[in-house]
Image (cartoon, rainbow, N blue to C red):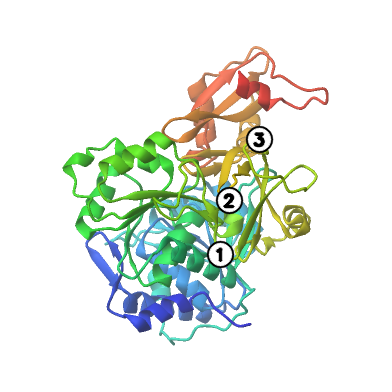
Amino acid sequence: MGFNLATVLRESTIAHPGRPLMHFGEHTFDYRLVDEISGRVAAGLQDLGLRRGDKVVVQLPNVPQFLFAYFGILKAGLVMVPVNPLLRAGELAYHLTDSDAVLLVTFESFADEAAKATAEVDVPTYVVNLPGSVARPEGMRSFDELCAAENTGEITAVDAEDTAVVLYTSGTTGKPKGAELTHFELFMACTVGAERFGFNKDDVGVGVLPLFHVFGLSTVLNSTIRFGGSLVLIPRFEAGPVLDAIERHRCTVFSGVPTMYFALLGANLAERDLSSLRAGISGGAAMPEEVLRGFEQQVPNIVVLEGYGLSETAAVATFNVSAAERKIGSIGKPLWGIELKIFDEDDNELPPGPEHIGEIVIRGHNVMKGYYKRPETTEAALRGGWFRTGDLGYRDEDGFFFVVDRKKDLIIRGGFNVYPREVEEVLYAHPAVREAAVIGKPDARLGEEIVAVVAFQPDIRPDAAELIAFTRERLAPYKCPREIRVLDELPKGPSGKILKKVLREA
């Protein structure tokens, strides 16, 4: 069955070409213009010889060029691989190599680090410049060149089950792995998710969640365009600019992780006119009840609704519907066409009730095709046709699901997944470190904070600042520990494995 996700942009453009699609600073881009420029990008990529199924890594913050690249890549029948702009050279080189990328699009502020990565992995690189600037490392070209091609208006025919996006997720074992999401899966995710939520063409959303993340890409961007709404793009979260944008553009929907709601509560909301907001969407981590209720008390018309999803499920799985149809603390009920169950360790379904905690498993139109080039990992994750989330939870008698813990060691800091082993490998590279374990500890603002527990080599004892600086040189800032704890010996089990449970309890 032929289908290209880019048709959601074309259909909304045909329906209302002059409607604003996105606001960015002082600029407004309507649907017609975004459709036109992304069409030029598609033609430019094809002129370079890129063909259906080729991978393009996009390393951009929330700027208009992200949309031009995204829909241009899809229109050309290519596969987009969005990555965090804060990745260091070694991390970016890994993503380029693992994804078999044939081209990189990066941003001026990150181009120097990208140049180091492409010195290891030779791929053509195009740079999005800041307004008025043409600076870029030698050998890199301007993204404007792609935008200068002649738009044919064509959308390449692909199969609905072809991969549209590869989203890298740290998961809980090994290096980051790419979840392959198809055109059909992403279309269904934004369709059923936005329909359940009641999103419509008159809604104006706040686009401050990073678009390289599944929450921002699928739930925010795709849903907005699927139903013809508007989006205010904000490159990075700061409470003041976000509140300014809500007031200026009369935003109706705010989507964010709990840390964002926490930060907004710390601003002086009483002096702001936020009466246009009708709904808040929260995901990525559990929302503390006091934060949810406090936000609703200070923002007159808003209802904050929690949902649940993962990179492997195109950001969606469950959602609370309304103030009348929600349970605070719950992730809601499954969306249309999606099934959730609670399995014990033997893959038996558990009955309802908080005393029956097991692993949350999912199947439906939202579940990924698999992990790119990892058949064994894919088979394990999709055993028996159910995706194993690694999250522990239960369902109640009314069909609401609750997440109570994570099955493994994944840390979620401010909505970003942090894989401890990746951080531990960097710590072990320091000559003074003999043993290292990275754990999460509860944090009121971020959900979890990163703690490194280390044992040093004899007679060597660097201070905490030195170790943290060492990790910052090699990892994106959100992955770096903020606290170092030093022990003479890390606790171990009979097999010699470090006991993280003991460290957490301590």
Q: Are marks 3 and 2 in contact (CB under 8 Å)?
A: no
Q: Nearer the viewer's eye, disc 3 or disc 1?
A: 3
Q: CA distance from mark 3 to mark 1?
A: 27 Å
Q: Is residue 434 visible?
A: no
Count the labels in the image.
3
Front residue (pair 367, 118):
367
Residue at x 43% of width, y 58% of height: 60
Question: Hey, what amino acid is under mark 1?
Answer: Trp
Q: How many C-alpha atoms fall within 10 Å of the one at disc 3: few (<14), some, or many (≥20)?
A: few
Q: Is residue 151 above or below residue 388?
A: below
User: Helix or strand or loop: what does disc 1 sit on?
Assistant: loop
- Which callout, 1 or 2, points at the residue further toward the start of the chain? 1
Residue on which disc 3 sits? 355
Q: Nearer the viewer's eye, disc 1 or disc 2?
A: 2
Q: How many C-alpha atoms fall within 10 Å of the one at disc 2: few (<14), some, or many (≥20)?
A: few
Quadrant for the C terminus in the image: top right
